[in-house]
Amino acid sequence: MTVRKTRLGGIVGGIVLALVSAACGTTESGSGTAGAARASAHPSEKPANASARDETPSFAWRGPMQDDWLSWRGPHQNGTSDDARAPLAIDPAQPLWTLPISGRGTPVIADGLVYAMGYQGEDATCVEMLVCLDERDGTILWQELFPDFLSDVVYSRYSISSPTLDPETGNVYCQTSPGRVIAYTRGGKKLWEHSMMEEYGKLTFPNGRTGAPLVVGDKLIVHVITASWGPLAPARDRFYAFDKRTGECIWGGATPGEMPQDNSFSFPIVFEREGRWLLAAETGCGHLAVLDVATGDPLWRFRIGSGANSSPVLTREEGGGDVLIGVHGNENADDSSIGRLIAVNLGELPKCGEKLVEPKDAERWRVDLEAFSSSPVVAGQRLFLSDEDGELACVNVESGALLWKHKLAPDQVHASPLFAAGRLYVPMNNGSFHILAPSDQGPEVLDQDQLEGNCLGAPALANGRLYVHTTAKLYCFGGSTAHADVPAPAQPAAGAPGPAVRLQIVPGDFALQAGAAFSLRARTLDAAGRVLADPAEGVTFATDLPLQEDAPSRWSVARDARPGANVLKAEAAGLKAEARVRIVPALPYREDFEQAKLDQPKPDAPSEQLFGFPPSFYLSGRSKWDVRQKDGSQVLARTIDNPLFQRTISLLGDEGDTDYSVQADVMVEGNRRGMASVGIVHQRYLIYLKGNYQQLEVSSNFESLKVNAPFPIEAGQWYTLKSRVDLAPDGSALVRAKCWPRGTDEPEGWTIEVPHRHAHQNGAVGLYGFTIQNRFKAYVDNLQVTPNE
């Protein structure tokens, strides 16, 4: 992946903010016309309206310009633009162009190209997509398609995330609903990818809320909720920073909060203090939180409610005081009322290595406004917010005085306003779009229109053109595409480096398959996070994992190495660092759980049979599975202690595995009124015995691809479950499964066969268990994963 230094620093209305990028979107991975380098799932698919013209825009990057819209929050991170050519009115019947793909995010625009996330199709044919368009007429230049897998998204709530552009290289980044974080060149060549679900245990939720990536300096940062391994096994809001060029994890698992009450997709803002770059975001546990961009260290947090989803804004007073402003629509932290807009004095932050600061008296002002996931816009001394009741509110930034409210629509969901040329551009959930000229006394309504579909994303403005993505289409309104070609403000010069105070291992949190070779080194940082020596000299490494340093910065793990998860420690000149390393098995892989030590008592019943832990590299394994004696063998059992964990998927393989078969012995407990379910994850398909329904089912998102066959299931009876996925050259696949009572002859035919047009080309193996009402357990034994013959 290509890196460039993001320009961080524009001043708007006294607010010093970093110029960063983010976005929201959806669809599946299929190659387009502009030379996507990876083997596409559908290499023959060309966009229906792909350009056949000779004057296709150049994919060369000319550098950032002032009028670019590189992230969903815009060049100043607060929903404002300096473009004075914003249209005075729009006509939905006569847009400049439209693109008929559904979306819930915001497009990003630079140098003649528009990038948007969207989705199209229904049920098994539904795919998320990233499209690259010609700014002039909306012609698709290339596209990538992303079929959903294993997510909990319902009602096609896709493309809530937006793409993000890197101002240094022009590269584009996206995050799909199930958590594929992918980097592309402007021309569509895939640079690198991380599957956050399969590598880090990213969780998904029915509302589909997925955050946009953030580019800052040499890093791409994502905000997700994960349940991983070791100390990071409990579900929490976490931040991960990847090298934007290579995809290496610079730091991961940064955890500023506590157990989330909501799944936040808050997009961070970036700002600088004394040469140190920081980010601020809201979390699902209801905090405003600040982290160190260089290290991921949580520095400061302030609880504002039981959950928070919006993107905060920051104001900087002339005296130097920083004020963070956040909003939420959940229960408040100090009473049972719902929703609040709140300003908080940031105050002093801890130095490197000091403890997290949690001030109790930092509140500056509050306003009783309820906005569940819309973000505020700050222009001068006014803050604008579209609240949950469909009203537009205006608040004085300095005093917190509510100046006015104006009803626009019945309600509001995710959409946020845009401010440009003294006007507000406000999309609403019901598809209405409003242009207003605000003052301290109230708004003057300049234009009011009805768009097709619902508006859930914020508008974007670039080169005098206004972009609005609805659940029906992407609209482009405005005039010519004459570019102002005013270069964006340069990044402030870095200060002089200081002495080394921190050792950092890169990658800092990663998974690798047994048999892999990889790069790893340690580097030193100063107190401002500036890299000093990379790699650092005189570093000694230590770990219990079977890792071998073959040469400086070059490491490997034997193919027959025992999988596991642990830390790698480094030390140099009195500085210490740790990296999290997870080794997953190479194929073939077999596990009968007989090696687990049964030496753990049940905490609330010490006299009960002792149990053991599952292998350490199983994501979210220890909290949701244990190893017990059952029917004369040690088997893996679903725990039923925590009612929050009734349904679980634990992934344990490499995301790149493909063309393999899986077999396991499975059993469920239950009775005629209720029965557990159990199964396997195979190349991003879920194949399981559905106890209550007496079925064998194949699915990959319960609402899109779901096919089942009748199968009689008895509680307490062991069955052997076997599956196979065969890929076809056209990108489709045939998913097959069979099941029979253990110890009897394997049936010749398959119980179920499911063709899938937009097939998953690869994916990690895993285990599934659903302990209905946590009354009945599910069991797995004798897991076998073998390459297809």
Image: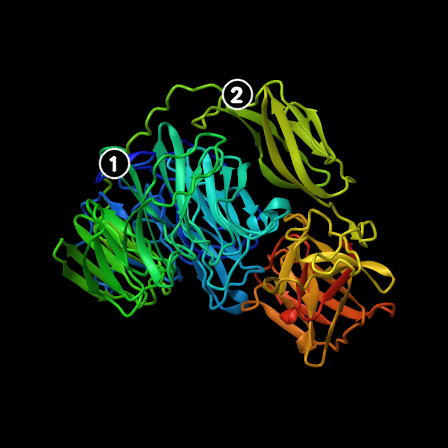
Q: Earlier in the sequence, mark 1 or mark 2?
A: 1
| Left or right relative to 68: residue 681 | right
Q: Amino acid at mark 1?
A: Ile
- Badge 1: few (under 14), some or many (20 or more) residues near its Cα, within 10 Å? few
Vertical order, 94 against 654 (above or below): below
Q: Identify which residue, 111 or 604, lies in the foreground.
A: 604
Observer-nearest residue: 416 or 385? 385
Which residue lies at the image location 31% right of the left edge and 34% below the top edge?
9
Residue 105, numbered circle? none
Q: CA distance from mark 1 to mark 2?
A: 32 Å
Query: Residue at position x 76%, y 39% from top?
Result: 559
Residue 780 shown left or right of residue 335 in the figure: right
Residue furthest bottom as drawn = 672
Task: Please say if 439 is above or below 338.
Answer: above
Query: How far across and down, in percent of the image, does residue 136 sit?
Result: 29, 49
Answer yes or no: is residue 35 visible: no
Q: Which mark is residue 11?
A: 1
**Residue 533: which disc?**
2
Identified by mark 2, the residue type is: Ala
Tell me the quarter of the picture where residue 691 sits: bottom right
- What percent of the width, then of the height, locates residue 206? 50, 64
Q: Residue at x 12, y 56 (%)?
A: 441
Q: Residue drawn at (51%, 38%), measured in percent from left and top?
A: 242
Local SS, label 2: loop
* Contact, mark 1 vs mark 2 (Cβ under 8 Å): no
